[in-house]
Image (tube, rainbow, N blue to C red):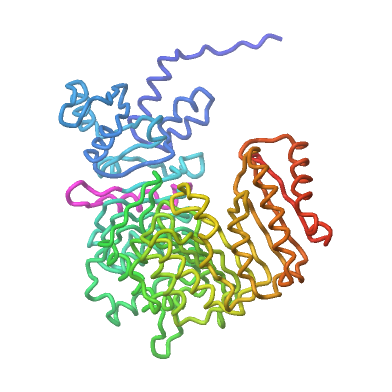
């Protein structure tokens, strides 16, 4: 039986129909068209962006120009400058201002679209969108203020029109904005509408000014699904009444942020650049001071913790450089669920000093506090470490991992002295001590004659009796680790872990001599209670398994006495090991 196919409409006609749908700016209709067939899906996909930006088109056009992006097929040459634009590009910018609908080159900015206030008001939605496949919205939304006024007049319209419809938004960013005075009350309709965006888990506020702390708190509280909050240069115009009893009382009445787990205060430099701005300090301290004040007991009312669910707090150097021991203690008390506190820098992901302590009642879990030294001012690092020593907070330090700098520069000496004071402050409660040997602050080459003495002043065992000792960053000669081990005076050490820097095959001769001397050091009576010694080595390049096995036997041959005691373990890996 032969089935006759119905005559198909020309492709040009379908394209014309789709253009009409797109021109109506009804994303729900576009989403339903995308479900018809693969051809429609391909044609509609570019109009259903993963990121939407709402703000001034002049500001966005400037970003397009500076980034040399492709706009409607017109490519900006890298040799062009803002002062000498081509006539062709200026003509196209004029057309963009007339249409007020800007598509950005996906190869440079990804899938995103820019809207202004009029665009938001003209966007259409269908009442039956949920039932018959309407658009669930973008994954990321950015609201950007006007160039001069920083106004965001479309925020209320956006929240009202798409509340309960855009259920796919995960991240909301607000940049260079002035929160409207008309939306300062905690019961403003915009906050009720924003509470319908339960899918938002990340909120970023960058250079945003709020008319009051209540407006800021209402925005954060309205997003019930919020998990991560990033604040940079958030200002409060009504800071004079910040600690007014009425303000504190009104803030305590806001809905608690039950899902908020991570807060970052300060600069985030994804390009690897870091700048220290001491002038930014007041923008954050008044906010932190308010959060600690609002959590203090208020008469007979129960104690309220607005950020009581926060487990991770990351502070940039712009925030913590002037902290005191009292301010750290107050902050820890205001965040009862805090598990990780980082005094960080924007270009660093790993802490150079990390302590883990067990607080007394009412905290059931330990707290880990990290200090990043990579590009921070040495005096600021030493200051914050000493603040941790003198803070009035009951914290029993159980574990310390610290980078040990050689005493070759004043900056090294300043930080290393503070680290030594911290270790001694921990005292007998310190159970696990990890030492990261740092060749130099910027990994420059150190002469061999200086290497042997560079850790001689790093006496970390005067008042401590750790059971576990870890030494990372060991060189083939083992000079640094032998110097560290020579200061051990307690027989409590039962476990030692030594991890070498990535080595080359040419280092084998130096390694054999270093391991032999290390074997001798670990025979001292102070190490009689050792039950486990782990030696880890990683090659810079990929190695065959047989070669790594032979290397393990080679290392074992120079650690015979440890091997005979039955306490030696060797771990060999290459760059492919995870």
Give residue 438's position: percent from left, percent from top.
Answer: 51, 55
Decide which of 520, 466 is in the foreground and name it. Answer: 520
Residue 243: image location, x then y, percent = 29, 78
Q: Residue at x 78, y 50 (%)?
A: 556
Q: Name the spot of residue 12 as percent of width and height, x first.
A: 41, 14
Q: Is residue 236 left or right of residue 462?
A: left
* Residue 121 spot, x, y in % from top left: 28, 44
Q: Residue at x 42, y 36 (%)?
A: 49
Q: Nearer the viewer, residue 307 or 375?
A: 375
On the rendered image, what quadrant is the C terminus found in?
A: top right
In depth, the one of 375 and 113 nearer the eye is 375
Q: Is residue 197 above or below residue 432?
A: above
Image quarter of residue 113: top left
Would residue 378 appear left or right of 225 to someone viewing this image? left
Q: Where is residue 223, by image quadrant? A: bottom left
In the image, 388 versus 186, the foreground residue is 388
């Amino acid at each position: 039986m032969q089935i006759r196919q119905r005559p198909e409409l020309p492709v040009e006609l379908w394209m014309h129909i789709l253009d009409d749908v797109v021109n109506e700016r009804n994303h729900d209709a576009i989403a339903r068209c995308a479900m018809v067939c693969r051809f429609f899906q391909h044609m509609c996909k570019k109009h259903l962006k993963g990121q939407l930006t709402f703000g001034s088109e002049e500001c966005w056009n400037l970003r397009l120009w500076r980034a040399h992006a492709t706009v409607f097929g017109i490519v900006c040459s890298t040799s062009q400058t803002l002062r000498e634009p081509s006539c062709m590009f200026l003509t196209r910018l004029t057309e963009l201002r007339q249409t007020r609908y800007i598509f950005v080159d996906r190869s440079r900015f990804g899938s995103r679209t820019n809207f202004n206030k009029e665009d938001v008001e003209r966007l259409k939605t269908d009442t039956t969108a949920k039932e018959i496949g309407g658009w669930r919205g973008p994954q990321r939304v950015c609201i950007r203020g006007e160039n001069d006024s920083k106004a965001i007049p479309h925020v209320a319209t956006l929240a009202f029109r798409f509340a309960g419809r855009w259920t796919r938004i995960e991240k909301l960013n607000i940049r260079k904005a002035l929160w409207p005075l008309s939306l300062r009350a905690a019961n403003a309709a915009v906050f009720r509408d924003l509470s319908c965006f339960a899918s938002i888990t990340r909120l970023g506020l960058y250079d945003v000014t709020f008319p009051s702390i209540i407006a800021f708190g209402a925005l954060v509280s309205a997003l019930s699904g919020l998990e991560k909050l990033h604040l940079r240069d958030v200002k409060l115009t009504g800071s004079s009444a910040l600690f007014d009893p009425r303000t504190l009382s009104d803030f305590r009445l806001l809905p608690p942020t039950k899902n908020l787990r991570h807060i970052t205060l300060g600069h985030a430099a994804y390009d690897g650049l870091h700048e220290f701005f001491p002038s930014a300090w007041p923008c954050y301290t008044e906010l932190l001071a308010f959060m600690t004040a609002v959590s203090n007991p208020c008469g007979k009312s129960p104690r309220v913790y607005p950020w009581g669910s926060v487990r991770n707090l990351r502070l940039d150097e712009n925030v913590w450089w002037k902290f005191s021991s009292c301010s750290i203690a107050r902050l820890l008390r205001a965040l009862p669920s805090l598990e990780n506190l980082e005094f960080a820098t924007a270009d660093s992901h790993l802490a150079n000093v990390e302590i883990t302590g067990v607080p007394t009642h009412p905290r059931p879990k330990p707290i880990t506090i990290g200090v990043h030294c990579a590009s921070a001012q040495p005096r600021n690092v030493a200051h914050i470490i000493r603040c941790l020593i003198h803070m009035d907070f009951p914290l029993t330090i159980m574990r310390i991992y610290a980078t040990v700098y050689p005493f070759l520069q004043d900056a090294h000496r300043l930080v290393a002295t503070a680290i030594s004071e911290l270790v001694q402050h921990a005292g007998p409660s310190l159970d696990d001590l990890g030492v990261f040997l740092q060749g130099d602050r910027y990994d420059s080459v150190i002469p061999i004659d200086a290497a042997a003495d560079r850790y001689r002043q790093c006496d970390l065992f005067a008042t401590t009796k750790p059971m576990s000792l870890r030494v990372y960053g060991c060189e083939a000669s083992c000079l640094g680790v032998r110097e560290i081990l020579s200061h051990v005076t307690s027989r409590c050490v039962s476990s030692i872990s030594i991890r070498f820097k990535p080595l080359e095959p040419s280092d084998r001769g130096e390694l054999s001599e270093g391991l032999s001397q290390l074997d001798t050091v670990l025979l001292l009576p102070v190490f009689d209670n050792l039950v486990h010694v782990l030696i880890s080595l990683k090659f810079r390049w990929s190695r065959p398994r047989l070669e790594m096995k032979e290397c393990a036997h080679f290392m074992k041959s120079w650690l015979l006495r440890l091997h005979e005691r039955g306490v030696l373990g060797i771990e060999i890996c290459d760059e492919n090991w995870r």
